[in-house]
Amino acid sequence: MTALECVLSADKERVSLLKTLDEESHKEKPNLKTLEYIHHRLLEIDSDTAEARSAEILNGLGFDKSMQSKLVKDYSGGWRMRIAIAQALVIRPDVLLLDEPTNHLDLESCLWLEDHLSKWNRIILIVSHAQDFLNGVCTKTIHFHKQKLNYYGGNYDQFVQTRDEMLVQAMKQFEVQEMDISKMKKFVAKFGAGSRASQAKSKIKAMAKRSKEGISEKPTAEKTLNFRFNTPTKHFGSLVQFRDAFFGYKPGEHLYKNLDFGIGPESRIALVGPNGVGKSTLLKLIASDLEPTEGSVSRSPHVRIGRFHQHFMEQLDQEQTPLEFLISEFKNEPIESL
């Protein structure tokens, strides 16, 4: 089954109607009412445009025309996930549930999906850690906090602003509550057995009533993580330098030609482009996992290169804890710093 056929197969009703239509049409005496219903329903679900819509969605997710004709079994897991997203979109469900839909998308596909969903006129429920994506698509936010669901209007940025404002207000209310309770306790302790005992009793009743109604817990913000990075040694000039570098996996076929650039100590570079064009290959050339077929890639003797790549998980020892892994990689570092 090709990628396009796989997406079309997701519309179970259309597939069933077309199958029944074919079977009924080949009968010696077809049921005219059945045929009339099938034709009417196919018209309602825009069956004639299904292939064009499927192709358009696949194209938006990074599949050109030739890729749409490629068998699904020949695709990697990441590309199959894109096909699965296309299947969910093409049937135009009343409720669309998406769990981390951007995980396997490149930047262009992610932007296309964001734009597509921003125009979606049906219900969407999205689980995602991509804040910009949520801002572009969502109009309401549900926040899981302390085993409760809290509902907010607006996109992710508006939710964060509202939540922070509510946290400040809740803290003020909590401080007032604590101050009132403290005053009551002091009053009871001072006058509980004296001439103002009746007032002390009323304070005790007030505290009991408040306790029964539920004393507010101290509001707490969600835990945040802070990372400290050691200040690197000051360097000048290029730390990595490409000089007229060529590279290709096959003789005579160059993926890169005439690369001539340097990476300086203040560089903050985003490497963008569709999947398969060679972004990971360029990183491997920088890290010296690969060497150019022509020209050169030089690295400063003082530069240290840290890496995380998309297949890093496959190289982890599944029997190690995170701390054990870090200890094995950084033997000279104190455990406290790890």
Image (cartoon, rainbow, N blue to C red):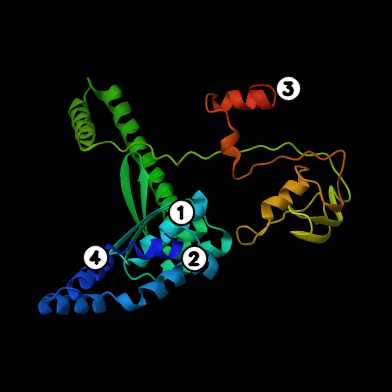
Q: Earlier in the sequence, mark 2 or mark 4?
A: 4
Looking at the picture, which amino acid does disc 2 mark?
Gln
| Real-space Cα separation, disc 3 to disc 4, in angstroms | 65 Å
User: Disc 1 marks which residue?
Assistant: 81
What is the x, y in percent for residue 105?
53, 57
The part of the image, by quadrant, that contains residue 275 is bottom right
Residue at image position (75%, 40%) is 305
Q: Earlier in the sequence, mark 1 or mark 4?
A: 4
Query: 67 or 130, which is in the foreground?
Result: 67
Circle 3: residue type:
Asn
Identify which amino acid the numbered label 1 is placed on: Met
Image quadrant where one finds the C terminus: top right
The quadrant of the rendering that contains the N terminus is bottom left
Q: Residue 332: which numbered mark, if any?
A: 3
Q: Secondary structure at mark 1?
A: helix
Q: Residues within 10 Å of mark 4 (few under 14, many from 20)?
A: few
The residue type indicated by label 4 comes to Ser
